[in-house]
Image (tube, rainbow, N blue to C red):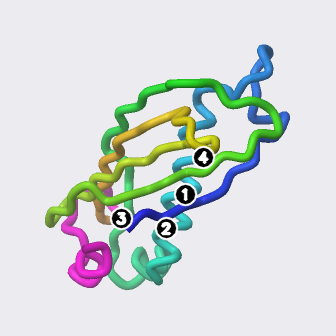
Amino acid sequence: MIHEFPVRVYYEDTDMGGIVYYANYLRFIERARSDWVRSLGIDQNAMRGEDGVVFVVRRVEADYLLPAKFDDELMVKTAVKAVTGVRLIMTQDVVRGDAFLFQAEVTVVCVGIGGAPARLPANIRRQIH
């Protein structure tokens, strides 16, 4: 399953050269992951309150392929690559039409409120598979 999340590039997203500032791609993919989790019916506030765990990004490997510019309409495509008891690995592509602009592999893990590693809750693992 591929989750799609539309993004419009605003002036505030660009740098002095008029292209999307590199760190903003991380913001775009974070929003897309949050929207994907919400679309699965996972309430992250409830997960923190009931299960005592939260998602954190452990690793991001990113490739910047082509620039996006002010007012571009982009799509962030998120797909699950692997799920284990403690981690979730996703691929996230930012595209404009058929052109791939940015690609990332993101590893997300769960941690307890105190910051110690924790297993992904079983109900969440089932929803993601």
Specify whether 117 is left or right of 13: left
Identify the residue under disc 2.
36
Quadrant of residue 2 within the rendered picture: bottom left
Point 43% across, 27% down: residue: 63
37 above or below 55? below
How far apart marks 4 and 2 lie (CA) works out to 12 Å
Q: Which residues are magenta?
A: 113-129
68 above or below 46? above
Mark 1 and mark 4 in contact? Answer it, CB < 8 Å. yes
Identify the residue under disc 3.
113
Disc 4 residue crowd, few under 14, some 14–19, many 20+, Cα 10 Å: many
Identify the residue under disc 1.
32
User: Mark 4 or mark 3: which comes first in sequence?
Assistant: 4
Mark 1 and mark 2 in contact? Answer it, CB < 8 Å. yes
> Is residue 99 found inside the magenta-colored segment of the image?
no
> Outermost residue, left direction?
85
User: Mark 4 or mark 2: which comes first in sequence?
Assistant: 4
How far apart marks 1 and 2 lie (CA) works out to 6 Å
Disc 4 is placed on an element classified as: helix
Identify the residue under disc 4.
28
29 above or below 102? below
Disc 2 residue crowd, few under 14, some 14–19, many 20+, Cα 10 Å: some
Quadrant assignment for the C terminus: bottom left
